[in-house]
Image: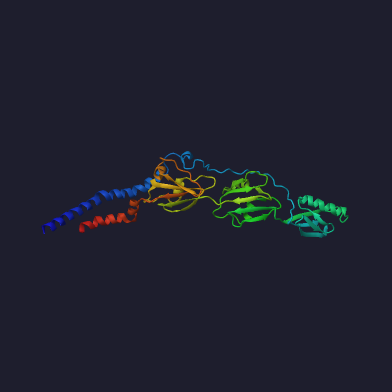
Amino acid sequence: MFALRLTTTMTRRFRRDIAYALRHRFLPSLLMLTMVWPVALGYAQFQGPAPTKADSPNPENKGLMERAPAEVLPGNPIVLHPGDSINVSVYGVPDYKLGARIAGDGNVDLPLIGSTHVAGLTVEQAQQLVAKKLIDGQMILNPDVLISVTDSTVDIIGVMGEVNTPKAIPAFAPMSLFDALSSAGGLKADASHSISILRKGVSEPLLVVLNSNPANAVDQNIPLYPGDRVIVPRTGVVYVVGAVMHSGAYPITPDTPLTLIQAVTLAGNVGFQAAASDTRIIRSTGATRHEIHVNLSRVMKGKASDPILQNDDIIMVPTHAMKAAIKGGGIGIALGLVYAIPFL
């Protein structure tokens, strides 16, 4: 009986000691931490030196993309090819008007002059040849011949990549870049605004960076010529996952590098439960993946450089087990213990 009373007395004292510690020591510190943490975290984002590329995981990243020149080389005159459909007419002679297709051997059958080889000639040269044959055959005196190409398998402007309707646009005269993109249905939502143009006779692709500033529209709307190929790539993205407010994929602006802090900010910042000091950047190089350890806490305090991200980087912000437990109900459990223990 005495032993039972002693045990009960010791248990009650132990419970009072725990309740006192929770009320006067642990709980105030915990509440203070939860109030100060978000403020300190937001303040730290704007502290410290500017990011440097030399200390980033990818110092070779140039970041900015070169603008295309506003003036480009003119295209070659339109040349007729086998398979082209043409319209041939003579001004002032209503009966001499027809449509024809150039055969595989390069010849086309025309009234009054028969089979005529036009493949390999420019439109102007073909007009002069037909006029000469009409004059030599004394069919029409001083004919004014007009040849126009209505369809071609060669003289096209190809628009491919992240457009709504990739297509080959028949082009028998220069066409503006904006008209070509509009003909292809416009850009997709995930299309990059850095557009490459492949042109015959030009060793390197022309690069045009589109932006929303109307003042730059004239420079960006460069002329395209038959044979040009317009390539619209998919915009680069980085993935932010783990203990952030909004996990997801975030695009990389083509003419501005994206840093770690910027990506985390786009994701709504890290949560209370984040183990920011153990942040990882998972980067793919070919078929190989490797992890780059980054102390996000030091970066946000300005004590470490802000790494520049690359396309398809994965930012993993792990969860701190104790903070996660507190966020998931630990505070409620602690408060419950404070008030429940004295009555046990």
The location of residue 129, given as percent across then percent down, is: 82, 51
Give the position of the C terminus as an image quadrant. Answer: bottom left
Residue 265 can be seen, yes or no = no
The location of residue 64, given as percent across then percent down, is: 54, 43
The location of residue 239, given as percent across then percent down, is: 47, 51
Residue visible at 27% across and 57% down? 336
Q: Is residue 60 above or below residue 231?
A: above
Residue visible at 66% across and 55% down? 169
Side of 202 where 281 appears, left or right: left
Residue 35 can be seen, yes or no = yes
Residue visible at 63% across and 48% down? 197
The location of residue 207, given as percent across then percent down, is: 60, 46
Q: Residue furthest right?
A: 138
Identify the colour scheme used: rainbow
Give the position of the N terminus as an image quadrant. Answer: bottom left
Q: Quadrant of residue 294?
A: top left
Side of 120 where 203 appears, left or right: left
